Amino acid sequence: MNKILSTLLLVCAIFSGVFSQDNMEVPLPRPAQLIWQNAELAALVCWDMHVFDGEFYVQSKVRITPVKDYNTFNPQKYDMDQWIKSLKDAGFKIAIFTVSHETGFFFHQSDATPYCMIALKWQDGKGDILRDFKTSCDKYGILPGVYIGTRWNAFYGIHDFKVHGNNQFAENRQKHYNVMIEKIVKEIFTNYGDWTMVWFDGGAHGPEQGGPDVLSVFEKYQPNCLFYHNLQRADMRWGGSETGTVPYPCWGTFPYPSTGAGESAKKEILANNFQLLKTGDPNGVYYMPAMSDAPLRGNGGHDWFWEPNQERLVFPLENLVEKYYSSVGHNTTLILGVNPNAEGLMPDPDVKRLKEFGDEIKRRFSNPIATTSGNGEKFVLKLPQMQKVNQIVLMENIANGERIRKFILEGKTKKGWQTIFEGSCVGHKFIHRFDPLALSEIRLKIYESKAEPQIEKLAVYNIEN
């Protein structure tokens, strides 16, 4: 009996080793990365002091010019629930708030800097936009993220991470700034509960580069959160443009553990207009999915922050739908930048468009003709009857890594099997659109994979545009 048991244990150990070897060949996502990709839609809520100054936003100017009067911040109709409900209606699963941007003002109650909500006449200095944001996200079932700008700070004279100068004054100011930022980050990470992600805009230089040590603070107080990013670590990567799209294929794996500050720390990342960020690398040893980001007000402009009389820039519904196909449908999460106005509300045209977008995505993908799932290299999905099909959604179980490397989709017509698409990357989600075909069956064949393919979902649709 003991011999049999020993043999069984040995066999189990051998097979366990084999499967472990398979899994080691395919980088696996952290739980926070799974949450990120499963969310599919995220909103970046952009607010800063220059929304209230009556002047057109020019980023290069804002980075070097302190705010004339921070008490111009006076949103008379401020309603955080209105913001977050508009995001919920659009189908966003994650919302990220800019607690600070390039003016250097922090929208929370801070003991580390006087340049925060405490300084305002508004709400007698007792307001806390970050806390309101977190509370409203919890109320509406949105996962909260926080965006912290440390690379530029016009109030403290920080430009591209540094106090400029080579003297004792600059050195002392840099030390002061670094300690202040570390304290602020600790406040944000300890006083507001758990965050789903933290976004350090433009990266966050650490002590090795003369900057604050935000990574160790993050790892101590928010270990289950998504980190983006510094020279040492990135849990996701920029998709190489601010168009809200990436090309196909776009792999969730990457050859480096970080993308660097300014997305160009390595010449390989900068090359060919950030091509590596856009496509990823199927042989990359780090799991680092891409994001596709764009401002909602980007139709002929590029407004991340609210400006008056710019409603014409809100993307038409058809443009947003196209972005969805070329972002979520290409294995990335779509981030749309939304911008509350100077009254403290999400503008009506933006709210209307967000609702239309959410409704349209539901209309398109809520009722598949047929679905299947499972493990293996071949799947045949029989339809209820011969009928028109024009879209296919394919999803891997990425919890066990991106395994598929080469596949073909076929449809059975009255004349026999017809090739619909030959592809490589599936990842979290791949959506393929094609001219309508009358089909009775859909067939998926996987010709090459790193381990046994695990199909989370194969679904077919006939969607009227």
Image: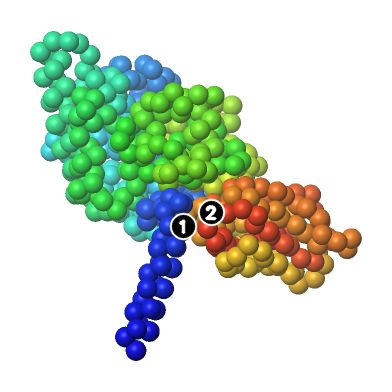
Q: Which disc, if any, is residue 210?
A: none
Q: Looking at this rendering, what residue extends furthest in the bottom direction? A: 1
Amino acid type for the residue under numbered disc 2: Lys
The reply to whether residue 272 is visible in this rendering is yes
Place of residue 237 in the rendered image (x, y in percent of width and height, measured from the top left): 43, 38
Q: Are the two marked residues, 2 and 1, in contact with CB atoms closer than 8 angstroms?
A: yes
Image quadrant where one finds the N terminus: bottom left
Residue 135 lies left or right of residue 26; in this view the side is: left
At x 22% / y 14%, what residue is drawn? 164
Give the mark, 2 or 1, whose residue is nearer the N terminus: 1
- Residue at the spot of label 1: 22
Residue 78 quadrant: top left
User: Above or below — where is 358 with respect to 212?
Assistant: below
Q: Nearer the viewer, residue 320 or 139?
A: 320
Place of residue 204 in the rendered image (x, y in percent of width and height, measured from the top left): 29, 31
- Residue at the spot of label 2: 450
Amino acid type for the residue under numbered disc 1: Asp
Quick one: label 2, few (<14), some, or many (20+) residues within 10 Å?
some
Q: Nearer the viewer, residue 353 or 15?
A: 15
At x 44% / y 38%, what residue is drawn? 255
